[in-house]
Amino acid sequence: MGNETDIPRMPQPIPRTPVSDGADQQIPLSTGFTIKAKPKMDFPLPLNLIVDIILSTVALGILTVVVYFALLRTKTDIRQTTPVQTQKTFSFTGKVVYLIGDAWKVVAYRRTEMKEGDILTEGDEIITEKNTRLVLSFEDGSVIRVGEGASVVLSSLIPASMTVQNQRGIVYARVNKDAGHQFAIKAKSYTVTSLGTSFSVENVDAVKVKVYESSVKVTDDQTKSAESTEVKAKQQWQENTQVSKLNDAEVQQNAFLAWSLSQDSLVPNVSPIVTATPSATPITPATSVTPSPILKPIALSASVQTNGIHLIWEAPPGVNISKGVRVIKGSGSNPSYPTDMSTEVLDPAIHSYTWDIKDSATWHFRVCQIVGTGCGVYSNDVSARAPTPEGNVVASQVTSIALKGQRIGDAVVGLTWKPQGLPGYGYAVLWSKNHDPALPIRNGDFVQTITDPNDIDEEIRNVEMHATYYFRVCELLGTTCATYSNEIMVVL
């Protein structure tokens, strides 16, 4: 054979060496160099790692679904709970248009002395003392009259369903007729309902109902059937008895009822303002109750002197004291004739009297118009602490008074104070737009006296809005101040 030619050969593959310990593999190259390479993973991931990944993925999915539906529900709740602009429920208010004697408004167990012009709202309680009469009128022209020794709660003043709770005493009501206006007086378990009537409800020994115009329905709320008994005009009803004819003589003998009926004849019929769907804005009625001026009380004041307690009175227009007055003294509030001690001042030109008493005790006084053998119009009640038997005014017992106060309503300031010691004659509450109000008061100062030494709070009403007032309280010592409190400022 001829000459042999060298045939080039293909490079042989480099054998792969299995690596089991995870070390880097040394790979030789044809160039004579070697490189390091990571070994190829010949086995799958560990089983526990795979399980962890799967569980994490499932948990993430579940969490996503939960969050989604939670957000969806939140949006739904927001749409459902978004306040809807609805008409605000409107309630009447009651205005004290007449007051003779002493009456109290009770709110959250706190008593506040009432006066003409006060505004009462739903939930307020009225308490009247002996020889007291009070007239309350509402926006629709309806009126209730409250007699002495009564406790009455204005339970509901919603125009469509007004309810007064007569807890004690006697109440006379004149309700305007309106198909959408229901008025009820509750006494014990009985509800007396009217759609437009003049009637009275007495709750003393037994519940008694007298109807003077139209009719009422009496329901015993304790009975299951709750059947109503109709009582018509000129009829009367008493618990545990039947309906009977109205006893006119009994009505005339009841001074409060006779007065209420006579006053009713002076009040014109007022067309109701509120319909079945009342406006949210109260409407002031065009007319209101105008009591007879002869029933205005006699104005009485008292001061302590070395020889006793000095009283001064002034009769209002229309009250005839040509036959004189009786001056009445008692240990409790609102003394009356002939129950308590009294003396007569028969000269109509004399308007003062000094009661010679020196026992350091606190006494209450009233005067009354002499009418025959009895009394006509009474004065307000005043009290004072008599001087000592030696003729000395009781010395100051208070070392300091800490006063606090703030605005608690429109044109109303609430004051509370803490004395160190007990005052002998009560307190004087002083306020002014100027600093340091004091007794005797200056021009622009105001004063309100409190004769009960245990009374340590007071509401000052009808102060000017958008003004700054300064308040102080002092211990009364006769007609002057002894110990003063700190001064506080209230911005209205």
Image: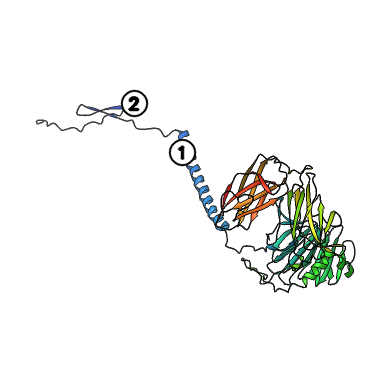
Residue sitting nearer the eye, 489 or 62: 489
In-image side of 86 versus 62 (left or right) = right
- How packed mark 1 is, by other alpha carbons closer than 10 Å (few <14, some 14-19, many 20 or more), is few
Looking at the picture, how far across and down is residue 363, in whole percent?
A: 79, 49
Disc 2 is placed on an element classified as loop
- The residue at which mark 1 appears reads as 53
Looking at the picture, how far across and down is residue 38, in whole percent?
A: 32, 30
Residue sitting nearer the eye, 383 or 224: 383
Q: Which mark sits nearer the N-terminus, 1 or 2? A: 2
User: Label 1, label 2: how many angstroms apart (C-alpha)?
Assistant: 27 Å
In-image side of 437 versus 49 (left or right) = right
- How packed mark 2 is, by other alpha carbons closer than 10 Å (few <14, some 14-19, many 20 or more), is few
The quadrant of the image that shows the N terminus is top left
Picture residue at 73% right of the left edge, 71% below the top: 176
Mark 1 near mark 2, Cβ–Cβ under 8 Å?
Answer: no
- The residue at which mark 2 appears reads as 23
Picture residue at 90% right of the left edge, 63% below the top: 241
Q: What amino acid is labelled 2 in the image?
A: Ala
Residue sitting nearer the eye, 96 or 425: 425
